[in-house]
Amino acid sequence: WEPEPQIIAAPDNAPPSDAIVLFGGAGLNAWQSVQGGDAAWTVKDGVMTVKPGSGDIRSKAEFCDVQLHLEWQVPEPDPNMQGQQRNNSGVFLQQRYEIQILDSYQNRTYSNGQAGALYKQVIPLVNAMRSPGQWQSYDIIFTAPRFDGSKLSRPGYITVLHNGVVVQNHTEIQGNTVWVGEPSYEA
């Protein structure tokens, strides 16, 4: 009978009572530029939008194991843009392990580079992408790798639901996301 799990309120259409809300629609106080300084994206009507040329942002808070919920949307595509050119972004966990964000709706690209991929490592189980202009969601359960000094003692794992559909199921992370070459862990 012991230990008894903590009770968490999970109201409809609201974060659980123990959630850390990184963006509530009003400002970027919980965010900073990856290059340092304030996040320069725009906030309008409760939506955070990439400001072209402003660079990547990251949360000020740092996390180890985490459950992350995010909602995102891509605009109607430029007809001249295909593959990785169509709204390419990503969610980096610990600034090292990327879950790809890409307009993968009727947009063929390399399989381990489409939405829901553990980028350049593991293709998603299915393509759950909605059409441009519709809201998408990711629910990510991340178990961080463990190290004994500089030696990996346990790899990281990721589960991703894209629009409520499992696209990564307790997938073993092979190491840091790299664009060329093989991934490897760094402590």
Image (cartoon, helix red, strand yellow):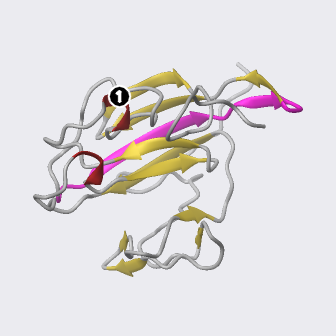
What x and y, as percent, mark residue 104?
A: 23, 43
- Residue situated in front as seen by the camera: 38 or 54: 54
What residue would you read off at disc 1? 124
Seen at 35% across and 55% down, the residue is 71
Tell me, yes or no, if residue 7 can be seen here: no
Question: Which residue is at the far right?
Answer: 149
Residue found 40% across the figure and 79% down from its top: 42
- The magenta span reads 133-150
Measuring from the top left, give residue 70's x and y in whole percent. 41, 52
Element class at badge 1: loop
Q: In the picture provided, is 15 more to the left or to the right than 126? A: right
Say whether residue 145 is magenta: yes
Magenta stretch: dominant SS? strand
Amino acid carrying label 1: it is Pro
Q: Is residue 177 above or below residue 48?
A: above
Identity of the residue furthest to the top in this view = 1
Q: Seen in the image, is 146 located left or right of residue 112? A: right
Q: Does the rendering let one see residue 58?
A: yes
Which quarter of the rendering shows the N terminus? top right
Q: Residue 34 vs residue 51: left or right?
A: right
Residue 161: say if magenta: no
- Residue at the image point whose x is 41% and y is 73% from the top: 25
Residue 165 placement: quadrant: top left
Look at the picture and state if 44 lies above or below 151: below
Q: Which of 80 and 143 is in front in this view?
A: 80
**Vertical placement of 21 versus 12: above or below?**
below
Please tell me how many numbered marks the rendered image carries: 1
Determine the residue located farthest toward the front in the rendered image.
180
Report the quarter where the C terminus lies.
top right
Q: Which of 61 and 77 is in front in this view?
A: 77
Determine the residue positioned at 55% across, 39% down: 177
